[in-house]
Amino acid sequence: MLHWFSNDRFPLYLAPMAGVTDVVFRGMCKELGADVMVTEFVSAEGILQRDDRTRHYTEFDEAQRPIGVQLFGSDGVRMGEAARKIIDWKQPDFIDINFGCPVNKVVAKNGGSSLLKDCPLLQSVAAEVAKAVPIPVTAKMRIGWDAQNVNAVEVARILEDSGMQAIAVHGRTRAQGYTGEADWEVIDQVAAAVKIPVIGNGDIHSGADVQRRRAQTRVRGIMIGRAAMTNPWVFQEAKHFLATGEQSKPASIEDRFAFMRRHCVAAIAHDGRGREFEILRSMRNRLMNYTKSIPGGKWLRQHFSQVASLTQLDDILAAYFKHQEELAHVQEELAADGVRLA
C-alpha cells in the first residue's frame, strides 16, 4: 500500500495542471496543507530525447514528498524506459500515468484520455510501465470519452489488474472538458469496484466539499485542481473542516497579497534573476486568478494584465488600497445623499 493511505489517512492531492503546478507553486501548496504532489505531465518521448525543457518539468524539492512524476504517451515500453530515466535523475515516490488529459494536442498523439477508447492499448501501457520500474505506478483518468461511453469502472478494473496502486478519477468525460458537473456517482462506483485506493477529483472548492465527498462516497482521498489556482488555502481550509466541522476564516486580502508577491519572488529566484520581465509576464494570469473573491478584483485584474516587474507589482498593491478607500468614501457620500448602489 502507498504509505500516505496507511492508518486510515485521507490525503489531499494537488492535481497536476499544465502551466500551473510547477515546482514553485507545488512547494507553496505543500506549506498550505497539500499532502501529495504530482508534477505537470511530461511527454515520455521528450524524456527519451533528453529534451531539457521536458526534464525541467520533472524537478521537485525534497520537501514536496510524497511526489509523483506524471507521464503521457501511448507506447508502454517507451514509457517504461522514460520512467526509468526519470528515476535515474531523481527518484520520485511514484510514477503517474495520464489517461485523463482532454487537450487536443495530447489526444491527437493517442495520449491522455484518448486511451479510454482503446482499453487493450491502455492495458498495455499501464502494464509495461508497472513492469519497468521498481517504484509504485498510479494512474489518473476521466470517467469516459463522452456521455455515451462512460466506462470508468471497466477501465479501473483493467488498471488494477495491470499493476496500478491507486487511481485518481476526474468525474467528467473527455467531451465535457471542464464544463458541466463532475459525476461523483460514477467516481463512487469506481471506488467500490476496485481494492486499490481511488482519489476523487472534480468540483472541490471548500472544506465542506471535501467532507461531503468523503462521507458520501468510498474514495480514499481527494484531488483538488482548479480551486487551488484561485485559492491555494483550500487545503488548509479543508483540513480545518475535517478536524472541526467548521469553516475556517478565509485568507485575508493582506495574506493574499503577501502570497502573490512571494510567488513572484520565488519564481524569479528559481528561473533566473535576469529574466524578471519574462517571468512577471508569465505570472499575469496567475496573479489574476488570485484576485477571485477579492473586492475590487476587476480593478486588480486590469492592472495585473500589464505587470512587468516586482516594483510595478508593489505599486499596484499599494494603489489598490487607495482605490478601495476612495471607492468606500464615494459610497458613503452617496448613501448620505440617499443614493443606494446596486
Image: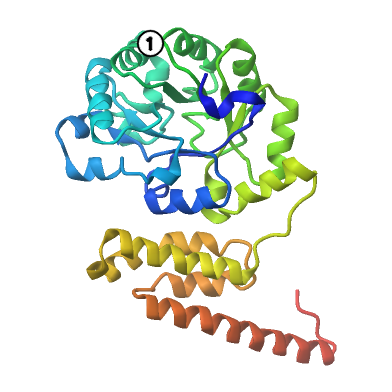
Q: Relative to 248, say whether 291 is above or below.
A: below
Q: Is residue 166 left or right of residue 249?
A: left
| Rendering colour mode | rainbow
Residue 169 appears in the picture as rendered: no
Residue 257, position in %: x, y?
54, 70
Say which quadrant the C terminus sits in.
bottom right
Residue 157, position in %: x, y?
51, 9
Q: Is residue 277 left or right of residue 233?
A: left
Give the SS element for disc 1: helix
- The residue that appears at 65% across and 62% down in the rendered structure is 251
**Residue bearing the label numbered 1:** 123
* Viewer-nearest residue: 205 or 215: 215
- The residue that appears at 38% across and 62% down in the rendered structure is 266
Q: Relative to 191, say whether 238 is above or below.
A: below
Tell how many labels.
1
Q: Relative to 62, say whether 296 is above or below.
A: below
The picture quadrant where one finds residue 197 is: top right
* Viewer-nearest residue: 156 or 36: 36
Residue 339 appears in the picture as rendered: yes
Mark 1: few, some, or many residues within 10 Å (few <14, many ≥20)?
A: many
- The residue that appears at 34% across and 35% down in the rendered structure is 104
Q: Is residue 13 left or right of residue 237?
A: left
The picture quadrant where one finds residue 265 is: bottom left
Furthest-left residue in view?
49
What kind of residue is marked 1? Gln
* Viewer-nearest residue: 322 or 35: 35
